Structures are given as structure tokens and as C-alpha cells.
Amino acid sequence: MLQTCRVLRSRAGPSPGSWQPLSFDGGAFHLKSTGELTRALLVLRLCAWPPLVTHGLALQAWSQRLLGSRLSGALLRASIYGQFVAGETAEEVRSCVLQLQNLGLRPLLAVPTEEEPDSAVKTGEAWYEGNLSAMLRCVDLSRGLLETPDPTGNALMQLKMTALMSTRLCKQLTSWVRRPGDSLELSPERLAEAMDSGQDLQVSCLNTEQTRHLQASLSRLHRVVQHARAQRVRLLVDAEYTSLNPALSLLVAALATRWNSSGEGGPWVWNTYQAYLKDTYERLRRDAEAADRAGLAFGVKLVRGAYLDKERKTARLQGTEDPTQPDYEATSQSYSRCLELMLTQVSHCGPMCHLMVASHNEDSVRQATKRMWELGIPPDGPVCFGQLLGMCDHVSLALGQAGYAVYKSIPYGSLEEVIPYLIRRAQENRSVLRGARREQELLSQELRRRLLGRSLRVSPH
């Protein structure tokens, strides 16, 4: 493996000539129609209005009562739904993805499944089994969206584990993971063996019902990854709340033990790391070293994080230490350190280590592209970039046109399924929406240029 890594590094090397930073001045907006730019500007301005985000579900219900379901739905499809969602049917999703591919972008499909922690509304094995079917269909759709058969596994999709298992069980497992002292009772290796064999687990920290649900959940996770591996679709597991993440990471480690071995063609199961948590850098470093020692491929989606307000509120209510960074600057420093760690890891291990730089921050993207050039990591290699569909297009398009691998996170489904999902994402990403002013300025600039026929510039920030 080390010899392979050395060969990869010697082959790549820094590109000839001096470093040329990418320009995120909206120049790539010429690839989009005036209608698309107008809708984007209007929707982003609406989403930056706090009452709309805070009271989104109530406003939707009020709109349906006042306008009727048909007119209310038409307005949503022409605005927020149309901006952030690929569509409802497979044909609509394919049409959206084809447009993205023509712009040099790739799809990262997400099933819009929602379960609020401790919710009693969505429970029962039938609900989780229904979600399993939706995940398996998403795997097939992700594979089918590729323009040509791709043996390298460039098809990616998001996986939300709490769509397949109870948040209550995750909290119970998290309590076990956080206990002092080591125990092999729920080690990744034992969980991986249980997934493979289907044999019953005997777990002392769980009651009979919880053990039965854990067994069913392991079976669902195994079936998703098994199907995704057969279809050559890589699964990026979403991070959630700190009360759940240790359990989710334990399950990711179990899946990685089974599916991320060196002979399997790179990491098929990736974990997500949230830079706004104080312990993220050390966890990422430990996990990277553990994967290297075990000879496992390692896949990482690096994000800033989306649950800041709720994490701080929970810490205050419980009287525990706030797990988040003190401010945005500290979060950015954490993201930068984690990014440097992972890019160095990729440069050492080549295809055994994959990274998605999931960020809307221009400085983070510039850091990534510059360090990739310095480390000799090719633009279309094991490092890719990710942004939300309908947002940050000035960065996505510039990256795509420069030859980098760029994925847009794409939810799809009916209005009834997706609107609650979108509102939750908006509530969790308030800072991202408020920070979209730069994009709004660039959209305004391009629209004025088209309407007035003269070139205007936005001063750099």
C-alpha cells in the first residue's frame, strides 16, 4: 500500500506553473438562464427573512387554508421547492441532474426523511422498513443517473441512519459508548459480525425490545450498504446531534470494518465530521489513524455543522459543557485544521482515503484547492466538493468549470415529504442562509448586467 501511495504522489506532483486561485465573482453565472437567476435571488432573499424560517410550517398551513392546496402547491413549486428540490418523480430528478451535469456538477441524492429526536409520531418497524425501501430505491436511482457505467464508484448518496433506527436506541448506545472503561460487547467488529451472520446479539445494556430493534436496524443498514456496494454507490452518513453521534460513529465503524477493506475499491461508507464541535479534530485524527492501522479505506465528509443553536440550548438546560466552538472564527479555524489533516492524509494514501469538502465558505474552498495543488492531488481525484442544491452556485459552477469534482446535495420527493425537510434544514442552517448575502449580490449583479447590457462588478469581500 505504501508503495502505491508513493507512486501516486510521484505521478501527481504539483501542476506546472504558479498557483492560480479560482475566482468566485459570479462569472460562471453566464451558464444559467435569467429565469433561474431571478428565482434564486428571490428565494434566497425570502429564506434570509427570519420569520419565514422560524414559522415555515405554520405559514405553509395558513397558505393552504387561504389559497387552497393546488394554488399553494403551485407557488411552492415555482419558488422554494423548485429552487432546492430536484422533483418528485424519477424523470424529474433525471432532468434536474442532466442540467447539473451540463454545468459540470454531480448529484448527491438525499431521501428527505425526518424523525425529530424523541418523537412518538414516527416509530415502529414498519416505518423504518418503509424508509429502507426508499433508501434502496435511492441507491438504484443514484446509479442510474450516471451518464456512463462508472467502475470507479463516483456515484454518491447521503444516508441518514436515524431513518433506519430509533433515536432513542441511538441515545442508549451513546450512553454506553461514553461509559468509562473499554468493553467489547458492542465493538465495531462484533456488530459487523452480527450484520454479516444475522445472528442474535445479546447486549447487557439493552432490554429485550431494544436488542430486537438493534438487530433489525443492523439488518437494514447491512442491506443498504450491500446493495450500494453492488451498485458501486458510495454512502455518506449524515452527522446529527451530539446525543446521537457517538452511536452513529460506532455503527459507521462497524460498516467500515465490513465494507471498507483495502480490496473493496475504496471507502463505500463515509462518516461526517462537524467542525463546529470542540472535539472534532482529535476524533478525526484518531479515526484516520485507526483506519490506517486496520488497513481500511477512510471516507470523510467535512462540514461546519448545522445544529449549533440546539446544541447550545441543550447544554444550558442540562447544565453540561457546551460542545460547540465559541464563535464562527473558532469554527473556521477548526475546519481549516481538519481540512489540512485530511488533505495530507489523502496525499499519503491516495485512493484509500476520500474527502468531501462540504462547505459554502469561499475561504475554505480556496484553501482546499490551493493545498490540493501543492500536494499534487488531481482536481478529479479522491477529493471532491459539496454544496446544497440551489445555493452557493457561484462557488459550485466555478469549481465545476475548473475541472473539480463537485456534488450538489439533492433532496427529492413530494411537497408533503420535502417541505418539512426543507424547513428543518433551513432552521438548522440559519447562518448559511444569512451568509448568502454575497451570493445575492452576485446574482443581482448578473441580472443588472443582462438587463442593462453593461458589466458591473461586486467588490471582493
Image: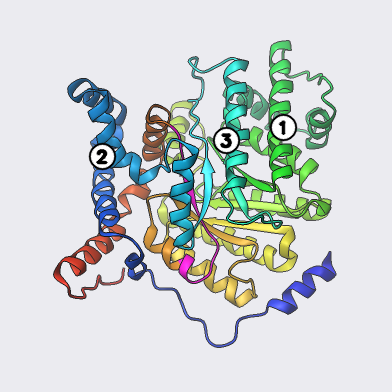
Whichever of labels 1 and 2 marks the residue nearer the N terminus, that label is: 2
In this view, the residue farthest toward the top is 208
Residue 81 in percent (x, y) is at 34, 39
**Front tag of 3 and 1:** 1
Q: Does the magenta stretch include residue 401?
A: yes
Gap between marks 3 and 1 measured at Cα:
14 Å
Question: In the figure, residue 397 lies in which quadrant?
Answer: bottom left
Residue 371 visible in the picture:
yes
Secondary element under disc 3, as helix, strand or loop, is: loop
Left or right of 116, for residue 131: right
Left or right of 269, for residue 137: left
Which mark identifies residue 50? 2
Q: Name the residue under label 1.
A: 223
**Front tag of 1 and 2:** 1
Q: Mark 3 points at which residue?
A: 160
Mark 1, residues whose alpha carbon is within 10 Å: few (<14), some, or many (≥20)?
A: some
